[in-house]
Amino acid sequence: MMKFPKIDFPRLKSKLQVKSPWDRIIISILSFLITIPIFIILHQNLIDLEWAFNLDRVFIFIFVFAAIFFLLMYLRTIIILCIAAYLLVLFYGSVIGNYGFSEISEDYNSMIYTMSDNPYPQDIIVAKLLPFPNKSKIINAIEYQNPRVRNFAIMATSKHFKGIRGYSDYRTIIQCFAVFKEINSRWNYVNDPKDGDYIATASESLDYFSGDCDDHSILMAAAIRSIGGTPRLIHTKGHIYPEILIGSMIDLEKVNYLIKNVLFVKESYGKKLHYHIDERGQVWMNLDYTATYPGGPFMYEEILGALTLN
């Protein structure tokens, strides 16, 4: 009778559990990348003890890094497999030109840079986790520092509402409404090609003021941001549209008066304003291409994702 060699299971298990030096290196890098945004959130939300040389913050960073490192090392087999699969997906995305190593690097750097200057950095992570189609391409297309975009926005402020006096606290919002009026009075809706989305840059849309909803949103956001306004894009079912930050509910009352009695009297007569209130109680007003006045009706109510530009 043939005898099979006896397997020493305890010894085999011991061999499988041996940690590779590469495991530690990979887990250390991943732990560091995860620690940075978590540390920013803690730094912004925890009381500053004002220790010498910011030692309290140093200890927080070390503690967070150590906790994440040991947790990932405990789950290292699963983590390494997930990292390998993710790298393959990024490699595939880089080859086909969709979403690869370059895009994820830009997104991570943008997130860290924005979080470091935001009083509520955790909101940035939430926004990043929400789905938003063609996010990287749209961000790059919002050329708010392009001279053509800014010159167009300045032209709009000179053409509309220039003579409005007595509302100095809302001058920027009034000027952004001038941009809205100029764009929406000239916008011509044109579909994308049948074989996929075409993302036009803001400066490109200035040539003919034509395109679909994402092209309109990109131009609106870029022009508003170029003169100091705070826009965001809303992704809903089959549609993207821009909104502008109004401020508090008190600000909304004053802006409501401006729209209905000073700026868009005929367009808004007998109609209500449409807006969203975010988790911080801030009011965002609809600026969709379908609206004839700021705060016009929504095309779709449900929000599937938000991209804030500040």
Image (tube, rainbow, N blue to C red):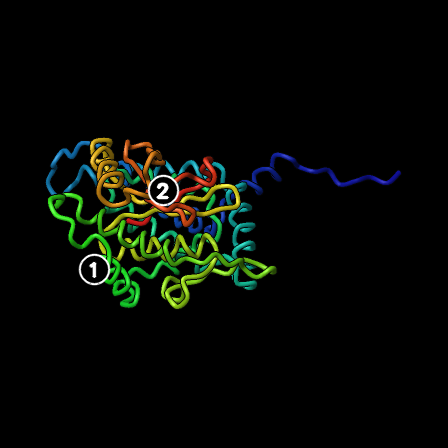
Q: Identify which residue, 302 or 169, lies in the foreground.
A: 169
Q: Is residue 272 above or below residue 306?
A: above
Place of residue 33 in the rendered image (x, y in percent of width and height, measured from the top left): 37, 48
Place of residue 68 in the rendered image (x, y in percent of width and height, measured from the top left): 38, 38
Q: As drawn, is 191 to the left or to the right of 44?
A: right
Mark in front: 1 vs 2: 1
Q: Residues within 10 Å of mark 2 (few under 14, many from 20)?
A: many
Callout 1: SS: helix
Place of residue 264 in the rendered image (x, y in percent of width and height, measured from the top left): 28, 44
Residue 298 lies in quadrant = top left
Rendered-image quadrant of the N terminus: top right
Q: Which mark is residue 265?
A: none
Q: CA distance from mark 1 to mark 2?
A: 23 Å
Q: Is residue 111 visible?
A: yes
Place of residue 270 in the rendered image (x, y in percent of width and height, measured from the top left): 34, 34
Q: Tag 1: residue type? A: Ser
Q: Is residue 206 above or below residue 24?
A: below
Callout 2: SS: strand
Residue topped by disc 2: 286
Residue 61 lies in quadrant = top left
Give the mark, 1 or 2, whose residue is nearer the N terminus: 1
Residue topped by disc 1: 158
Label pair 1/2, CB-CB below 8 angstroms = no
Write the residue at 30% across / 57% down: 223
